[in-house]
Amino acid sequence: MSDTEEMPSETQTEHPMNVTAAVAQLRLLVCGLGAALILVSLALSAFVLKQNRDLAAVTNNRQQQLVALQSAGKPMMYVLNELAKYSVGRPDLTAIFTKHGLKYSANPAPGQPAAAP
C-alpha cells in the first residue's frame, strides 16, 4: 500500500443515509412497537377478564354447593343422632362411629344432640 492511497474510514459510510428516510424509518419502528404494545396489553386484559369470570362462576357454584350441603346436613344430623341412640350398648355400631371419626355422647343432655360431627 502506498502512502498516497487513502484508506476508507470505518466511521464514514459509502452511501450516507438521508435524514428524512432515517426519521421515517424511526417513526415506523416506534409506531410498530406501540402497536405491538397495544396488542399485548389487549390480549393480557382479555385473559385477566376471562380468568375473573371463571373464578366468579366457580365461587358461585361452590356457594350453591355449600348451601345445599348445609340444608342436607340437618336431616343427616337427625339420622346420626337416632343411630347414636340406637347404638348404645352395641359395640359393632360404636366401632363404625369411631372408624369414621364421629364423636357422640351416649347420654346427651336434654335439648342437646346426641352426636357431634
Image (cartoon, rainbow, N blue to C red):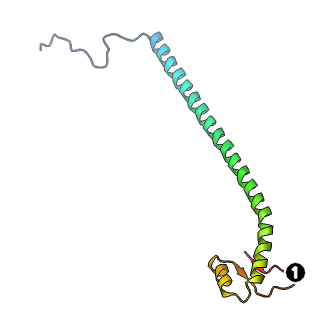
Task: Specify whether 7 is left or right of 103.
Answer: left
View extreme (bottom): residue: 89
50 and 40: which is toward the camera: 50
Residue that badge 1 annotates = 111
Task: Specify whether 109 is left or right of 104.
Answer: right
Image quarter of residue 9 = top left
Q: Residues within 10 Å of mark 1 (few under 14, many from 20)?
A: few
Report the amino acid beneath label 1. Answer: Gly
Quadrant in which the N terminus appears:
top left
Tell me if residue 42 comes above or below residue 55 in the rendering: above
Tell me if residue 20 comes above or below residue 86 in the rendering: above
Indicate the secondary structure of the residue bearing disc 1. loop
Tell me if residue 15 comes above or below residue 46 in the rendering: above
Residue 7 point in image, percent of width and height: 21, 15
Residue 36 point in image, percent of width and height: 54, 27
**Numbered label tally:** 1
Residue 65 point in image, percent of width and height: 73, 56
Residue 100 point in image, percent of width and height: 64, 76
Image quarter of residue 73 = bottom right
Residue at image position (48%, 10%) is: 20
Residue at image position (61%, 38%) is: 47
